């Protein structure tokens, strides 16, 4: 009965995620987009600058909560491709360092060559950020240290075999207690590993630590030790889901009063030639002059997105729905260098609009954006010829980078 109840709970959360994500992400796209536009125009000494910055911070926090819910409910990584984990660690640590109080020291160490996995860079970033925020909360108002390490490790056959167990944790994953547990703490392992090269990502803190009772429930959705309003209880369950979907495992060592160490093991790609390109973001940061058709039925999202692209130098034609966009495209299919369209719209979905446009002009570059859709994913979009698949809210430099990257790839093809 417990297993069935847990399965029903997981299914309900997935349904909830799909139901709220699209509309909520549209709202967040408008809030974040307009906040960023305002920050561009406000001097740092302007009386409203701090208030607008707080709006942007709160909007990003809300977007992260939605990503946690979606990550927990999904079954596969969104964009499984070779990614350099050291670059992700560096970016995440930079962001964490900017948000931590001065009383907490943040230490970064990397001992690895060719730190490449097949996975989703956004979700790996989410793992690091969630663990970093949890570590900050564990330290609280005291002075302390958070250490983030990345290193190469080799999982031996006997080691991996010894982790096999029939015991399951609250989410249905294999779990093993590696050290004798008592009321003050334990060392727990969740997940199974195959022998071979791995990356070990470690986030260690000098905070309050966890008892065995807390550790035994830490991956349950909505379980939290924080006060009401201070956390959703989705952070560690999202971390757990992401790691399991990447074929990895988690070791957690903690003891009350002695801090906590999370060790994430991820299968590492064996080096076969050059590493994945790491300069795309820098190249994508350049301004543009191309003409873009932007399609979205939400006027707030449409206007905010258009203004961001126009600020980056692009010429943007705004279309408030699929039928008008398709009529305009039929009348002059060579007029636009790129089409950016929302997925969920009345009368005609974004994927259908893309199919019709590609029949008219097979080489047209199309970016499909969605707050959430159970009807289409990146694989389906790429199969019909869509160049990029973006999850809302995507604003600011991330939006400009995506557009520049798609346009540059089209030119190089």
Image (tube, rainbow, N blue to C red):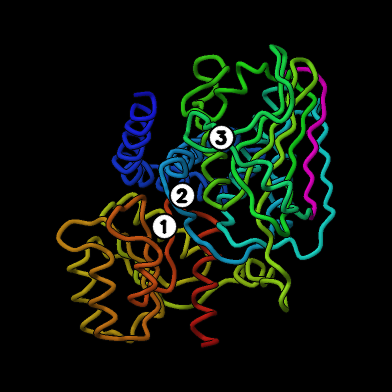
Q: Is residue 410 above or below residue 132?
A: below
Q: Mark 2 highlights which residue?
A: 33
Which of the two labelled residues, at mark 3 and mark 2, occupies the earlier sequence position?
A: 2
- Residue 45 appears in which quarter of the rendering? top right
Q: In which quarter of the image is the N terminus?
A: top left
Give me the residue at 71% from left, 55% from top: 198
Q: In this view, does 360 lie above or below 8?
A: below
Q: Is the residue marked by circle 1 packed among few (<14), some (14-19), or many (20+) residues within 10 Å?
A: many
Residues at discs 1 and 2 in contact (Cβ within 8 Å): yes
- Labelled disc at residue 48: 3
Magenta residue check for 390: no
Magenta-colored span: 140-152
Q: Nearer the viewer, mark 3 or mark 2?
A: 2
Which of the two labelled residues, at mark 1 and mark 2, occupies the earlier sequence position?
A: 2
Residues at discs 3 and 2 in contact (Cβ within 8 Å): no
| Front residue of this view, candidates 179 and 385 | 179
- Labelled disc at residue 305: 1
Label 2, secondary structure: give it: helix
Q: Where is residue 410 in the image (x, y as percent from the top left)?
A: 49, 83
Q: Where is residue 161 in the image (x, y as percent from the top left)?
A: 67, 47
> Seen in the image, is 321 located left or right of residue 381?
left
Label 1, secondary structure: give it: helix
Q: Where is residue 82 in the image (x, y as percent from the top left)?
A: 61, 66
| Front residue of this view, candidates 248 and 327 | 248
Q: Whole-Å distance between the Cαs marked 3 and 1?
A: 22 Å
Label 3, secondary structure: give it: loop
- Residue 264 appears in which quarter of the rendering? top right
């Amino acid at each position: 009965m417990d297993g069935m109840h847990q399965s029903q709970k997981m299914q309900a959360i997935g349904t909830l995620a799909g139901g709220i994500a699209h509309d909520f992400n549209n709202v967040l796209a408008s809030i974040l987009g307009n906040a960023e536009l305002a920050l561009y125009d406000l001097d740092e000494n302007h009386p409203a600058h701090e208030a607008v910055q707080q709006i942007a911070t709160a909007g990003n926090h809300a977007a992260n909560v939605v990503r946690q819910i979606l990550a927990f409910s999904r079954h596969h990584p969104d964009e499984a491709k070779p990614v350099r984990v050291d670059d992700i660690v560096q970016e995440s640590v930079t962001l964490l360092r900017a948000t931590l109080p001065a009383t907490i020291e943040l230490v970064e160490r990397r001992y690895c060559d060719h730190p490449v996995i097949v996975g989703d860079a956004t979700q790996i970033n989410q793992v690091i950020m969630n663990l970093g925020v949890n570590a900050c909360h564990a330290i609280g108002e005291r002075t302390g240290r958070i250490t983030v390490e990345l290193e190469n490790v080799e999982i031996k056959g006997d080691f991996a075999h010894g982790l096999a167990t029939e015991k399951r944790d609250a989410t249905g994953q294999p779990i093993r207690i590696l050290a004798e547990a008592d009321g003050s703490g334990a060392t727990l392992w969740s997940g199974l590993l195959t022998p071979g090269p791995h990356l070990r990502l470690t986030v260690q803190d000098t905070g309050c630590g966890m008892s065995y009772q807390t550790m035994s429930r830490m991956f349950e959705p909505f379980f939290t030790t924080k006060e009401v309003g201070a956390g959703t209880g989705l952070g560690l369950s999202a971390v757990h889901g992401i790691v399991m979907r990447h074929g990895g495992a988690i070791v957690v060592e903690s003891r009350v009063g002695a801090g906590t160490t999370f060790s994430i093991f991820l299968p590492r790609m064996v080096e076969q030639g050059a590493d994945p390109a790491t300069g795309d973001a820098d190249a994508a940061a350049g301004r543009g002059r191309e003409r873009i058709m932007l399609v979205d039925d939400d006027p707030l999202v449409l206007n905010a997105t258009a203004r961001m692209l126009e600020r980056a130098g692009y010429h943007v034609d705004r279309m408030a729905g699929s039928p008008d966009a398709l009529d305009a495209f039929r009348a002059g299919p060579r007029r636009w260098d790129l089409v950016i369209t929302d997925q969920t719209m009345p009368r005609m979905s974004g994927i259908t609009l893309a199919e019709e446009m590609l029949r008219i002009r097979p080489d047209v570059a199309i970016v499909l954006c969605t707050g959430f859709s159970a009807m289409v994913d990146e694989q389906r979009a790429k199969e019909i010829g869509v160049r990029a698949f973006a999850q809302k809210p995507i604003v600011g430099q991330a939006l400009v980078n995506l557009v520049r990257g798609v346009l540059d790839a089209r030119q190089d093809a």
